[in-house]
Image: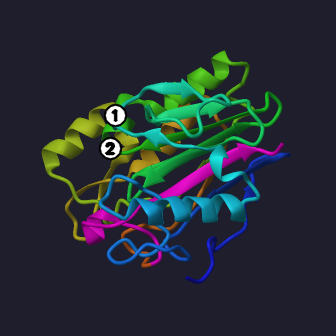
């Protein structure tokens, strides 16, 4: 084991912290080495639990204050309160809260982790945007839910995390056409000149259409970056996380 976090949490507004984990510094053994945070990929549950504790402690959070989702590539958005941690994860692909000290967590291994914050309304949100979630509109659904709770799209700040890039994400031409019919910005060509999808570009376009003006984007490709988990590259592998929380 080396260290639980490669980088310290960054700010997504005053009193709002976020980070994207990598694969180093945990206790999981191959092929999940080592900071696997996903419990449903075949890893030892004790190692996953230990890794989650390491991340929480490195962020200065109570290990019981991480809110995980049971992600299903849908558009359900849930509100997380103090009763969420420690319970069976809710089935959803987006979550938001106004509870300080409660870290919202999204698991990925090529899909796009999207973290949102409205510093004035004191709201934070997290979404899991894969190909199907992009088409269904999970990120706009999260923006709408946060807006209904008192946020404003023009105040919301977004952080788009590492994901597979369009140059690496080859798909059948029929699949590309289906996705691009709903989200044209996701259409791209791979480095091999074949049909591809750029999910991050699609998410960024959806955020802009929803009125979100402040967007940062991690440029790393999960498939090309050895210290990030990638299902497309490795098949059996672990899951990284994007986390966002209001400081107590």
- Whether residue 94 sits left or right of residue 102 in the image: it is left
Quadrant in the rendering for residue 166: bottom left
- Which label sits on residue 131? 2
Residue 215 shows up from this direction: no
How far separated are the C-alphas under marks 2 and 1? 6 Å
Crowding at dot 2, Cα within 10 Å, few <14 / some 14-19 / many 20+, comes out as: many
Who's the residue at 79% across and 27% down the image?
A: 121
The secondary element bearing badge 2 is classed as: helix
Magenta residues span 227-248
Q: Position of residue 117 (x, y in %)?
A: 70, 38
Quadrant containing the N terminus is: bottom right
Q: Is residue 128 found inside the magenta-colored segment of the image?
A: no
Residue 173 location in percent, x, y? 15, 49
Q: Which residue corresponds to the image point at 34% horizontal and 37% vertical from the top-left?
A: 72
Q: Position of residue 240 (x, y in %)?
A: 48, 61
**Image coords of residue 35 (percent x, y):** 50, 69
Q: Are marks 2 and 1 in contact (CB under 8 Å)?
A: yes
The residue that disc 1 covers is: 135
| Left or right of residue 144, residue 173 in this image | left
């Amino acid at each position: 084991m080396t260290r639980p976090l490669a980088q310290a949490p960054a700010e997504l507004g005053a009193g709002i912290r976020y980070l994207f984990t990598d694969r180093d510094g945990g206790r999981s053994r191959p092929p999940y080495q080592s900071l696997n945070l996903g419990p449903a990929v075949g890893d030892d549950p004790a190692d996953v639990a230990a890794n989650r504790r390491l991340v929480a402690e490195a962020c200065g959070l109570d290990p019981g204050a991480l809110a995980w989702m049971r992600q299903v590539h849908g558009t359900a958005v849930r509100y997380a309160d103090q009763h969420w941690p420690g319970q069976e994860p809710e089935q959803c692909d987006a979550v938001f809260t106004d509870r300080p000290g409660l870290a919202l967590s999204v698991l990925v291994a090529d899909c796009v982790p999207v973290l949102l914050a409205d510093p004035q309304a004191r709201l934070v949100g997290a979404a899991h945007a894969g190909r199907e979630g992009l088409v269904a509109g999970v990120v706009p659904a999260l923006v709408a839910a946060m807006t209904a709770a008192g946020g404003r799209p023009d105040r919301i700040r977004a952080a788009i995390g590492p994901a597979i890039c369009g140059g690496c994400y080859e798909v059948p031409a029929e699949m590309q056409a289906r996705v691009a019919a709903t989200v044209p910005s996701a259409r791209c060509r791979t480095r091999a000149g074949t049909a591809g999808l750029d999910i991050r570009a699609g998410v960024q376009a959806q955020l802009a259409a929803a009125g979100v003006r402040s967007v940062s984007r991690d440029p790393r490709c999960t498939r090309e970056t050895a210290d990030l988990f990638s299902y497309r590259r490795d098949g059996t592998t672990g899951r990284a996380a994007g986390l966002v929380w209001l400081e107590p």
